[in-house]
Every structure is written in C-alpha cells, then in structure tokens.
Amino acid sequence: MKALVTGGAGFIGSHTVDRLLEEGYEIRVLDNLDPKVHPKGKPGYIAEEVEFVEGDVRNKEDIRRALRGVDIIVHQAAYQDYLPDYSTFVHTNAVSTALIYEVIREEGLSVEKVVVASSQAVYGEGQYRCREHGLVQPPARPQEQLDRGDWEVRCPACGRYMEPLPLKEEYANPYNPYALSKYSQELVAVRLGRLLGVPTVALRYSITQGPRQSLYNQYSGICRIFTLKLLHDKPPIIYEDGKQRRDYVHIDDVVEANMLVLRSEEANYQVFNVGSGRPTTVLEYAELLAGKLGKDIEPLIPGEYRLGDARHSVSDISKLRQLGWSPKKGLEDIFDDYLTWVESFGDIGKYFEEADRTMWERRVIRRASALCEA
C-alpha cells in the first residue's frame, strides 16, 4: 500500500508519516517547504525511505505528480496564519482539496481513502446556552464589546451572558478566513468524495501540541510562545483575562485518530472532532508550564485581545469515541515531550518576538480601553 501525505514535512504530517511507515506503508510526501516553517529546508526527521516531492498543493501538475500510484491520501498541507490573507487561505486549503478530486477523476485513479485535516476553528464563537433563548450559535464578539474588556459571550437576542457548551460536529459556524477555508475544504472533500465514490473523512483537530511544532512558524501558538518567553525569563502575555477555555490534544492522540479513520469503513463520509475534551483555561496552562520549567514568573494580562478569537473552544469527542478512539495523553505529556524537543535547538532567542510585532502592525492584536467586571 502506498500513501501520499501532503504537508508531510510539517508537524502533524510528519508524525503521521512515521506511523504509516511503522504500519508498512510506502510513503510519498508532497510539501513546498515553506521557508516560514522550514527555513533550513527539508527537516532531518524525514526518513530516508520516504519519497519526497517538493511541490505546492495549489499547483495541479504537482498534485498530479504526487497522486500517481497512491492508495490512500492524508491531506495535511494547509495555510495557517492570523493575518488577513483571504485568498491564500482559500487557495491553499479549499482549492487544493478540489484539485485532488479533480485529478482523481481525470486520471481514473483508484484511491481507497482520503483523510482531510480540518480544524476546531470551524465552530467560530462556538455553541452556547442562553437561559431564555436556549441553544445559540452567536456571531463573533463585536469589537466594541472587546474594546470595553467585556470578554464573555452575550446572547445576541437578550444581551445576557451565556453558558458555553462542548462543540458538536453538527453546529459549525465559521467566520474568520482560516475557519471559512477549512469548512469549505470539508464540504469539498466529503461531498466530492461521495460523488466519485472515494471514501473520505474530515477530522477537526483541537489545538494539537508536541514535538516538531515549528519554532519558526508564528502560527505555532501558545506552547511555542509561552515556552520561549519563560525560557528567557520573560512573563507570557495572556490575551483577554486568561479565563478563556481551550482544548489541547497531544500529537500522538491525533495520529491515532488519523490511523483509526483510515482503517474504519464506518467513518466514511463523516466529520469528527479530535481533541482531549478537557477544558483548560489559558491561565491554568501558563501556570502549569511555568511550574514544569521551574520558573516563578507570573503572566502579564494587559487587556490585549486578538480580533476574531473564540472565547471558549472545547470539543465534544463522543462521536469519535464511538469508533473506539480516546485520548491517552494529557498536558503533562505535552509539556514533557515538547520541552525535550526544544532543548535540542540550543539558542532559541531570535524566535520569540517577531509574531506579536507582526500582528500588532496588522492590527490583529488590539488593547481594550477599559476592563469590564463580568
């Protein structure tokens, strides 16, 4: 069996490659080695036996070249950023997926399974319960509210604060460009897969963490940013008030989910959440990480916020549990494995200031003019 992993030099893609090799697959990787993520070129962790195709998923001929002779496809290549590059999101995430099915049809390829990497971001502001109006899928919190430092989500009908609910697959509500592109990708994949008779599954990953998260990639998120700050004896900067809840999942659990749906006929033409299902506030995360590093450093909470961030995002993982999957690792494992990997880099000082500066320049990060007592 031959597997194609797009984005196979990246974080989730490379770990999936390793697991597929363990299972006896021949592997082809298609990756453009984006210098923002891979400034030193092809990573050394890519095994010698992997057939590596340097190319772009937005290029139809690169897709055609990569698809020849493969039995399964794990489509991990994606564009992720906080910046407003709308067309790049759509071209890289959604159009690339359409190109895969277009080439499958044109070439008459016998592909047995496609697994597409989606994101928890498709839920937007999430799912809430209002005491008066029941289940609500609210729009993004307005800038005027955030400027007041009023962080919790209010019912759009009555203005009351609402109770956040675990995110269920049937209630997607994307609104930022990344989320819109990933939801479009899901629809393209599952529906074209059904049209062509190519079994397809989309997985909505929660915040995935562990070794190989790029230190160079500004999108790599909280683990990278907080670790780099603390290692340089600087306080992490927490957006909003730090009480926002997130769902962090270990890379090994994500790979297990990928492998499960590859094998499962029951998963075909469906969408599944992949997360820990455990809520952790950003403040709790910062405190746990500081403790793990032996740093007595309190985070700063200056009232900054990122326009478009969801307030609370914790996935309901019961649907994938029904297929026999469950997360095995927690935050302690994430920190242990990530920090061991970071130690191999030596001096990492140059990586940790650039992302915030870029987002301030683009006005992605803003500061509340006052703080509201909820």
Image: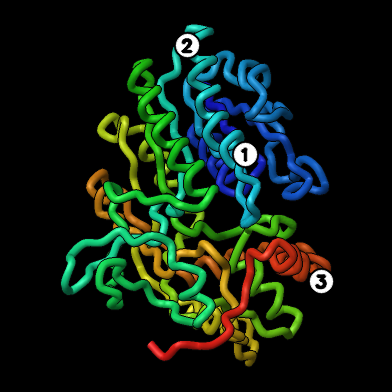
Number of disc labels? 3
Please name whichever residue, 182 or 369, is drawn nearer the observer in this view of the structure: 369
CB contact under 8 Å: marks 1 and 2: no
Please name whichever residue, 173 or 200, is drawn nearer the observer in this view of the structure: 173
Would you name the residue on which mark 1 appears?
Answer: 87
Circle number at residue 105: 2
* Secondary structure of the residue carrying numbered label 3: helix
Amino acid type, label 2: Arg
Residue drawn at (67%, 85%), measured in percent from left and top? 235
Q: Looking at the image, can residue 55 be seen? A: yes
Give the label, 1 or 2, closer to the camera: 1
Mark 1 vs mark 2: which is more N-terminal?
1
What percent of the width, then of the height, locates residue 152?
Answer: 39, 76
Q: Looking at the image, can residue 17 be seen? A: no
- Is 19 left, or right, of 265 in this rendering? right
- Is 197 left, or right, of 351 in this rendering? left
